[in-house]
Amino acid sequence: MVRQSHSPSPTRRYDRLHSVAIAILVASTAPPAATLAVSMGGRHRLRGSDSAPLALFSSTYPIVVTGRRSTPRVSKGCARSSRSSRCDDRGNDESMVRNGVDRRPSWPGPTRCRRRDVALAGMSGTTTTMTTATGPRRFAPVAGIVATVVPTLLFASGSAHVAAAIAGGGAPPLVVPSSSSSSSYHLARIIFLRLLAVVYVSAFSVARFQNRGLIGDNGIAPARHALDRAEERGEAKSTRRREWLDGAEGERRRHSGFLSRCWFEFLECAPISSFRDKFLHRTDAIDRPVISLLWLAGDRSNLNPWLDGISCVGLVMSLVVLVRGCANFPILFVLWLLQRSLMSSGGTFYGYGWEPQLAELTFHALFLVPTIGLDPFPGPGGGVFGSTRTTYYPVPMLVIYAIRFYLFKIMLGAGLIKLRSSDAKWKPGNMSAMDYFYETQASLFEVWSNHFVELVAPFLLLLPFRSLRLTGGMIQIIFLNWLTIVPAMLCLDDAFLVNNLRPLVQRLAIGTPGAQLYIRALVSGDISLVQTPIPRAIVSMAFFLMMTKLNISVVRNLLSRKQIMNGSFDKFRLCNTYGAFGTVAEQRVELIIESANDIKGPWREYHFKVKPGDVRRRPRWISPYHYRLDWQMWIAAQSGSIERSPWLISFLLKLLRQEKDVIDLIERDPWKPASRKLHANVEGDKQVDESPKYIRIEKYIYKFCDNEALRNGQIDDVDDSKPQYWVRQRVGRYFPRQGIVTAEMLEDLLNKH
């Protein structure tokens, strides 16, 4: 029951919202058959706009709205009609029921209580009461907005315990005893694998539609160039090894003991020697093996079919995992190998921090799933996919601990790199980083919150206390990015998921064969976890020890004053160190590319798909589908001169040539999106070439358009029919610094690189 005291202040609109919000809050924590009673005392009326949230829940919960003068005017979308839904205190019970919402009179008058009491009656007849104290009236607008939005989001996510905590009351009755399954993670593994599959679907979709223009045969930075350089390094290494074996060392090894000679002959046999020369010796610039299926291509000048095949196979495999909610070692190994193939040969456009993050997380997941089977609930005996199984093998806990540490080092590394950077905006005494990071919603609280989430909350992931681990997992789920949401799911055990996910969310997230039987076993407390088979236990222990050894260098880096961001300490990049946004630029610098047919102009601007350009184009949604070219343009703007981004030279050359694969990466070609040809305009007997001949890059500072820009007259009035989102100011030339540049000049520069 929600009791609302009379208040003549103009903020009582938000008090009504607050009462409705708490009603929604209780609904989000209630068992399926509960009844929600909302009473509005005093002069407060539950208006049509207030009734909309309640109508949202009326299909799930019987909702009773009562009060002395609470005669709602429900909109047509929420009730049969505004006119037919009106009633007063004197109406009979039957006439007060509209669309499942019962409006029966309750208390005869207002109450002096300054608390809102929420009473929830469940099927058992018991009542759970939750109270929340209200603060001063001047905070009512803020309280109303927060209390309306937050519970609704919590309902959507099914976070009942969190919602109850915010409401200020006790948790709802548990469906599953936490003590019976606090070490069970079968449902968490299903959600983990499905979220990982979502990331892979996005990654391979990007590869399918962007690789030809980025690293294809005629792309900006063809993958064959990275493979050719790695092959040259491999040949040099193989030559040095042969010379070493032909020398005194090889002679000594041939005349050593029997076992040494056998081992030496094994390492030098044809298959091992071929694998070493073609894979291990072919390395990148810092001596890391280039692991890629593209080595199998016979003709390296025709890699487009291979790139398309890798992305298509990856899409199919990831969709299988997404639909089934389960995977095995071969499936995840194929996904890992496909992703590593692109990461190793993708060069600049696959050099971001989340590429090794995804590869490392997938490598961890290899040891989390069954070896061969596709049963999400593996165990001894039983029917197909666990349909009649009552006993289950536990999810390998050592692997879960390793994945939690993976999340721990990502977040802690991101926090420490900020404190150790030269950017004073992250440090106490300044704390203004978010003023430039967000621009429109910055605050000092944001910076402190960021430091708490990255420097303090990660330790909750490693503590042996369940409540702290659940809290740490929930914090990381809502904070950074997709690749931190995925491992954070393994901080939530099955009891927490069953108790807090709404039925619809459960069906979507963990709807797999055998899931209902497993959940019923959790509810009844009859779940039985048998001992892990010895071979699987040995593999898990070996993996845990290997990752422990590899992470020693990561821990040393985290403790070092000269911390490295986004680096690896083993040649195969199985274990890496991470960091993010050590410095925050104080201005948003954007590179604008323009081309012209005549040196005197006019110059036509190239527009990208998501990167800011046209000041009247609404900012685009950019997640989870990633626009690699747009992102790399932003990095080039922050990096300095074009010498630090040599790929731009190739990009400009291909824009002048109007190559289709590259043109497809941008929103539109100002010289018409067709293939390169002459568009003849007859001026007497003269034909005008309509293809670009000159190109340049200008630097602009972008800011969001606001009232200050309106007052200063910075608004572009070319098209008054569209709103303006950005204000930009030219600050100079990026390339070339002086003069002009043509296709011939770009070819010469490209050959030098």
Image: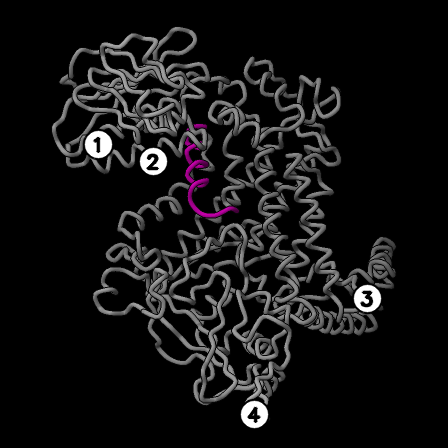
Q: Residues within 10 Å of mark 2 (few under 14, many from 20)?
A: few
How far separated are the C-alphas under marks 4 and 2?
Answer: 67 Å
How far separated are the C-alphas under marks 3 and 1?
Answer: 72 Å
**Residue 140 horizontal side relative to residue 721, left or right:** left
Residue 150 x/y as whole percent: 35, 34
Q: Nearer the viewer, mark 3 or mark 2?
A: 2
How far separated are the C-alphas under marks 1 and 2?
Answer: 15 Å
**Residue 311 horizontal side relative to residue 148, left or right:** right
Q: Reading the chain from its start, which is encountered first: label 3 or label 2?
A: 2
Q: What kind of residue is marked 3?
A: Gly
Give the quarter of the figure containing the C terminus. bottom right
Judging from the image, what secondary structure is the residue with disc 2 in?
A: helix
Residue at 27%, 19% in the rendered image? 2
Residue at 49%, 27% in the rendered image? 501
Query: From where the camera sits, is residue 679 visible?
Result: yes
Disc number placed over residue 149 in the picture, else none? 2
As displayed, is residue 125 above or below residue 600? above
How far separated are the C-alphas under marks 3 and 4?
Answer: 53 Å
Q: Residues within 10 Å of mark 3 (few under 14, many from 20)?
A: few
Query: From where the camera sits, is residue 753 visible?
Result: no
Q: Reading the chain from its start, which is encountered first: label 4 or label 1?
A: 1
